[in-house]
Image (cartoon, rainbow, N blue to C red):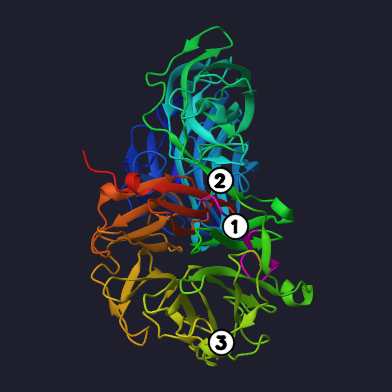
Amino acid sequence: MVMRSLMMFLMAGTVCAAPESFEAIQAGAGISQYEVGYGSWQTSADSAVVIAGHSKTGSQSLHLKGGEDQSVELMFKQPLAEEMWLSFWSERWTSRTPFEYKLEVKIGGQWRTKKDLSSETKLGDFHARTGLLLEQGTEGLRWVATTPENTGVLIDDVWVQKLKPMMVSSIETMQPVVPVLVGKSVNPVVGFTVDTDGRTEPKTVEEFQLSLEGTGRIQDIKSVSVLYAGNEEEPGAGKVIATSSDIAEMMTLKGSATLESGRNQFWVSVSLKENASLDGSVDAGISKVKLGDGAELQPSVVSPQGAQRIGVALRQGGDDGSKAFRIPGMATTNKGTLIAVYDARWNGGGDLPGNVDVGMSRSTDGGQSWEDMKIIMDMGDDPKWHHDGIGDPAVLVDRSNNRIWVAGVWSHGNRAWHGSGQGMKPEETGQFMLVYSDDDGKSWSKPINITEQVKKPEWHYMLQGPGAGITMKNGTLVFAAQYQDGDKNADGKKVGTPYSTIIYSKDHGKTWQAGNGIKSNTTEAQVVELGDGSLMLNCRDNRGSYRTIGLTYDLGKTWELHPTDREALNEPICMASLYRFEREGEADLLLFSNPNTQSGRNHMSIKVSDDEGLTWPSIWHSLYDVRSCSGYSCLTRIGNDKVGVLYEGPHEIYFLRFTLEELLRESK
């Protein structure tokens, strides 16, 4: 097997004066010869290339491309005369398998594995920093990866350093937007980093002086902890090294951690009492950190501006025996009750087909507290049929009679997105199912199958939004929906191009009809009725970057694209929520929630428009959770002046509440 490689030569007797971040190399092409101060670079564009726009520091990184045993080598001009310290950052560039990634060293002319990097290298944002000791006599390094084609691994900030005593260079606080959730044991409120240089004679931290100034009600806090996460930067990562339940505005916590060379991440975390008010907030700061040698570190900013809102961890992995929860939907009944629906994914986070049922939680106090989960859609548990999973729910309230409808798709065997075929029977294709409640969500009907009403036999699949449906002013019930058409390859295998659409009922759910597709390669959508009676459909678009947005005046028979189609609203190819908030004597509002990115599911945000979606002023963009997550969400009205959002964490379901006043903050 021929190894395609990047050769990096260091001048005799020298090491990298700073991390190699690939900034001085032209992006986009391999390098045949490139001279730098410490040697020369050579590369083959077939295996590795410098890319722009994604990096740990600077703006570029090295992309080790997808394929079998792709490799990158760093060869020293002379064997190392003494032990050295190697550090670098890696990012997994795919969630698919296979994924094998390792570092090899060359000593005495022979290559051997130094470390398997497969499990520690994470997807997205360069979360993994590797540090290890290089032996005297090391001649070279080789990174080797086997990944699917068109994927690979990113590498950045490669640094070979001489060993020297550790020195602390700085301490800095940060406060990413992360809600504090009732029911979760770890809620990062503020973080701080301690930067060091050198590895021998390592330093330890022993004591932390904290402030809870800015917290609305200190009595809502049950405990405070300090977490040490090493080089992991995700908010809330790490292990507890100090904790106290003796809550006061100023606190001193004692606990020990040995610092690593480079950046060391810490988090101040709280847990809340069950009755903590959703109208409250929590803030914290770091005034002083004491080291084991008696030295004291004081950040220039004790607590960055802002505080964390309080929410509820409605569903967490392990609750009621389910390993994961996904796909939130939520609606407010005529009585003001909140109805939350979601997938209970009993065996793990994977999509249908699988052991999945639709769960429901109910709140009668605006989301402050929730009743125990009820399973309202369960089609069986026979392993022969992949446990007859049903999921991806959407919920709708008929405003004329307060009947609550929930839609779900039933996969009898492998009859979900990839396995569903043409036809109408459960053994052929996914089934479009409904249940309803006539007592404000306390009890539920048996499932009703409407597949034959809404699906064409030639289509491969038909299902709901998911999220929430609406009642139009004329009483028509509408769910957003999606279908896979009858397209096939030349060999007869399924293509099933997806289209967003709607289904509707003019007789309060007795019968249902489907509209036509809005645009190819659109899927999960949400629908609202605008002031002129038209329906706006806001769609996930497989082309990425922006949402598809369209209008229909005839219940989906025909569609026209909105002026903001594929322009106004970012998306990373993910479900989103759209909700119309009607107001007396003022302009009605459109509210939109999704990951406000074009790559990666993070930065969950609400945006507001007061002109029927023509503009979404940046001052009305509210970030509510910066962390990586599964990304789905659903909005609903709470009373006259509040909005609730039900959204996904990492295979968990969270609830937050906002006032219109804070969402419509004025520019200063």
Residue at 57% over, 50% down: 144
Q: Is residue 296 above or below residue 157?
A: above
Q: Mark 2 sits on what residue? A: 312
Dot in front, 2 or 3: 2
Position of residue 33 measured from the top left corner of the image (x, y, whole percent): 35, 47
Position of residue 41 measured from the top left corner of the image (x, y, whole percent): 39, 43
Position of residue 534 measured from the top left corner of the image (x, y, whole percent): 30, 77
Q: Mark 1 sits on what residue? A: 362
| Helix, strand or loop at mark 1 | strand
Under mark 1, the amino acid is: Arg
Magenta region: 349-366
Under mark 2, the amino acid is: Val
Q: Image quadrant of residue 421?
A: bottom right
Under mark 3, the amino acid is: Lys
Q: Is residue 18 above or below residue 591?
A: above
Residue at the limit of the structure toward the top, as seen here = 294
Residue at the limit of the structure toward the left, as seen here = 668
Q: Is residue 173 above or below residue 279?
A: above
| Helix, strand or loop at mark 2 | strand
Dot in front, 1 or 2: 1
Looking at the image, residue 594 sits to the left or right of residue 508; the answer is left
Nearer the N terminus, badge 1 or badge 2? 2
Kindly report the distance in space between the C-alpha atoms of the residues bearing marks 2 and 3: 45 Å
Q: Residues within 10 Å of mark 1 (few under 14, many from 20)?
A: many
Q: Mark 3 sits on what residue? A: 493
Kindly report the distance in space between the C-alpha atoms of the residues bearing marks 1 and 3: 43 Å
Kindly report the distance in space between the C-alpha atoms of the residues bearing marks 1 and 2: 13 Å
The front one of 607 and 124 is 607
